[in-house]
Amino acid sequence: MTGFLDRAKEKAQQGLAQGKQKVDEVQAHRAGSDLLKKLGAAYYAEHRGSGTPEATQEALSALEAHIALHGDGFLHA
């Protein structure tokens, strides 16, 4: 009986770990998409005359930092 409970506990822990990993992936994907939108908005504002090159560069740097940590998978989805 103890062996069964140990296996059940192990399976539950594996399921939780997989679920957490998937949540982390979704959150990273959303964050990357948000940063990409901010870059687009900064670029558009700069070219309309209401934004600055510095704001565009900051948005680009933030996006590049995110890609360095999480990859660029959100760009291909």
Image: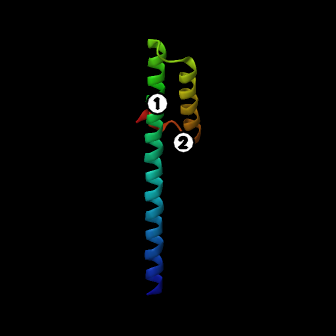
Residue lying at the far bottom of the rendered structure = 1
Where residue 33 appears, x then y in whole percent? 44, 35
**On screen, residue 40 above or below 18:** above
Residues packed near mark 2 inside 10 Å, few (<14), some (14 to 19) or many (20 plus): some
Residue 4 in picture, x, y percent from top left: 43, 81
Mark drawn on residue 17: none
Classify mark 2: helix, strand or loop. Answer: helix
Position in image of residue 62 (x %, y %): 56, 33
In terms of secondary structure, where does tag 1 sit? Answer: helix
Is 53 located above or below residue 27 in the figure?
above
Near-viewer residue (21 or 48): 48
| Sequence-first tag of 2 and 1 | 1
The residue indicated by pointer 2 is 70
The percent position of residue 65, horizontal first and vertical second, equals 59, 35
Q: Please give the name of the residue rendered at 45% of the width and 24% of the height, measured from the top-left corner.
A: 40
Q: Indicate the amino acid at tag 2.
A: His
Q: Residue at x 48, y 72 (%)?
A: 10
Task: Name the residue tied to disc 1.
Answer: 36
Q: CA distance from mark 2 to mark 1?
A: 14 Å
